[in-house]
Image: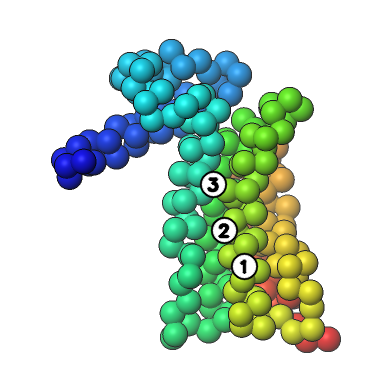
Amino acid sequence: MRQGETRTKIRKRAQILAAAERVFFTHGYDRTSVNELRREAGVSKGTIYAYFDSKEALFRALCDEIHDRVFVGLINTHPTEESDREWLLRFGIAFACLMTGEPAIAAGRTVIAVADRMSELCEAFFESGFQRGLAILTQFLSDRETIPGLDVPHAARSLLELFLSGIHRERLLGLMSEQDAHAQVPETVARAIAIACRRT
């Protein structure tokens, strides 16, 4: 495949995903049709199916793309000049801002609306977001022995929950704006790290 063709395919895929984000999060998963998606993207139905096998596959890809925006910069990155606590603070803020940001919240609400009959969609969303963050944090804590004397997988899960510390729930329920949530994130994450790293 020529380089120009590759760039065209990348742009076209991004165009479809951008349209999917607007349509899915405005109308919900059930009320979104492939016809609506193709109209919003300005492409044919055949073009959409050339990139994604189904509406579900497109939604899964959208969730992955939303989570990739933050995680791509956090995987296997631990600068030598950065202390463990500095990395945890940077990771925690990025993770919490991702999970409470409007795209992830809209995706979460969309998934919850179909959870009773599309558990595999919920599982895919969970794996590309929370579970992915959990894997990164678990590996870091295991490698660095940052939190002494604790079961690392359980410690990592608890720490991620502390990073969100009620903010995520309020965002899902529409009780807090994205701006207010993100204003609270740095202090919330710093407090979570202080609690987790305290030696008993």
Q: Secondary structure at mark 1?
A: helix
Seen in the picture, residue 68 relative to 105 is either above or below; the reply is below
Q: Does residue 40 appear anywhere in the picture? A: no
Q: Residues within 10 Å of mark 3 (few under 14, many from 20)?
A: some
Q: In front here: 170 or 146?
A: 146
**Pointers 2 and 1 in contact (C-beta within 8 Å):** yes
Seen in the picture, residue 166 relative to 13 is either above or below; the reply is below
Residue drawn at x 17%, y 45% is 3
Q: Which residue is mark 2?
A: 95
Q: Which residue is mark 1?
A: 137
Q: Position of residue 164 (x, y in %)?
A: 67, 56
Q: Does residue 167 appear anywhere in the picture? A: yes
Residue drawn at x 52%, y 31% is 57
Q: Position of residue 115 (x, y in %)?
A: 72, 30
User: Gap between marks 3 and 2, in whole Å?
Assistant: 10 Å
Q: Position of residue 127 (x, y in %)?
A: 63, 48
Q: Position of residue 146 (x, y in %)?
A: 66, 82
Front disc: 3 or 2: 2
Residue type at the position of mark 1: Leu
User: Gap between marks 3 and 1, in whole Å?
Assistant: 20 Å
Marking on residue 101? 3
Q: Secondary structure at mark 3?
A: loop
Residue type at the position of mark 3: Gly
Front disc: 3 or 1: 1
In which image quadrant can residue 163 be found? bottom right
